């Protein structure tokens, strides 16, 4: 059998991209998630944006740790790692290997902008953008609870803490939705194509700065 794709080096899921200097690939992934959420859950997206909660405040740790934190490993991340290890094409749908030497940082920023405008090659398969698809599935499961909340602190607590109390059956529903094909409610290539504003990383940074001025952020 073919060897499993590595999760950190240049092939496979390549999670190392999320830790590049300047975090440009991470910002691009967050921008793509923001656009996907606007397409799939426009009411929820607007609700969170109006209350100063862009994805950078709640999804950064999800992507950087591949959902191993803060959720129980067996609930979601173990299934995602299975998918990423099986998909040699790159489970996270991230960037190509980083440039080295002079101009590397600028090239990484350019690549991040291109990623925001580019869907995974196989968005309908488990290996096509599995991390953003899991994030969308998780937020769709949370949507009814979040839409009933108005307070910033209550919303951020619901996103980060409420899933910890979910029973296994509810986590299975999230996983099934994340890995579902388009015909069964999963994200399609069209979803990824529509969710690709090239300027989104800059807009995301601006939203993050606005949210950081709230006094409550010191307690997060």
Image (spheres, rainbow, N blue to C red):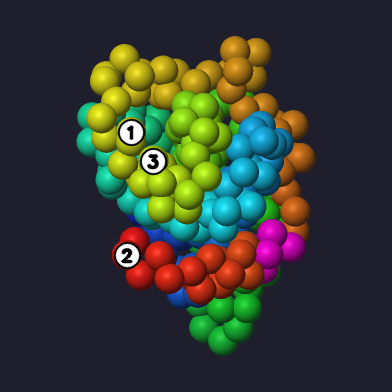
Q: Is residue 60 left or right of residue 189?
A: left
Identified at 41% across, 42% down, the residue is 159
Residues under labels 2 and 1: Cα distance? 20 Å
The nearer-to-camera label among 2 and 1 is 2
Residue 137's mark? none
Give x and y (percent) for residue 134.
47, 34
Question: Magenta segment range?
Answer: 199-203
Residue 158's mark? 3
**Dot 3 alpha-carbon crowd within 10 angstroms: few under 14, some 14 to 19, many 20 or more:** some
Report whether residue 96 is seen: no
Residue at numbered disc 2: 219
**Dot 1 alpha-carbon crowd within 10 angstroms: few under 14, some 14 to 19, many 20 or more:** some
Give x and y (percent) for residue 92.
48, 44
- Name the chief secondary structure element in magenta: helix
Give x and y (percent) for residue 191.
70, 33
Residue at numbered disc 1: 163
Report whether residue 216 is seen: yes
The nearer-to-camera label among 3 and 1 is 3
Q: Quadrant of the N terminus?
A: top left
For residue 111: magenta? no
Query: Tag 1 or tag 2, which sits nearer the N-term?
Result: 1
Element marked by disc 3: helix
Q: Is residue 166 left or right of residue 89?
A: left
Identified at 40% across, 30% down, the residue is 83
For residue 202: magenta? yes
Q: Are marks 3 and 1 in contact (CB under 8 Å)?
A: no
Quadrant assignment, res 173 = top left
Residues under labels 3 and 2: Cα distance? 15 Å
- 162 over 8 or under it: above or below: above
């Amino acid at each position: 059998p073919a060897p499993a794709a590595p999760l950190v080096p240049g092939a496979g899921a390549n999670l190392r991209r999320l830790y590049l200097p300047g975090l440009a690939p991470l910002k691009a992934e967050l921008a793509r998630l923001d656009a996907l959420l606007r397409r799939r859950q426009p009411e929820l997206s607007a609700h969170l944006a109006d209350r100063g909660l862009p994805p950078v405040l709640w999804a950064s740790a999800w992507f950087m740790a591949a959902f191993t934190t803060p959720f129980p490993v067996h609930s979601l991340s173990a299934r995602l790692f299975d998918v990423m290890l099986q998909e040699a094409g790159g489970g996270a749908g991230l960037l190509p290997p980083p440039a080295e030497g002079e101009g590397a940082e600028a090239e990484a920023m350019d690549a991040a902008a291109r990623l925001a405008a580019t869907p995974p090659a196989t968005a309908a398969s488990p290996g096509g953008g599995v991390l953003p698809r899991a994030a969308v599935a998780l937020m769709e499961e949370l949507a009814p609870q979040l839409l009933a909340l108005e307070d910033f602190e209550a919303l951020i607590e619901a996103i980060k803490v409420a899933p910890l109390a979910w029973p296994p059956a509810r986590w299975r529903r999230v996983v099934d939705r994340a890995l579902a094909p388009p015909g069964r409610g999963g994200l399609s290539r069209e979803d990824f194509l529509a969710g690709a504003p090239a300027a989104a990383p800059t807009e995301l940074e601006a939203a993050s700065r606005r949210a950081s001025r709230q006094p409550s952020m010191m307690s997060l």
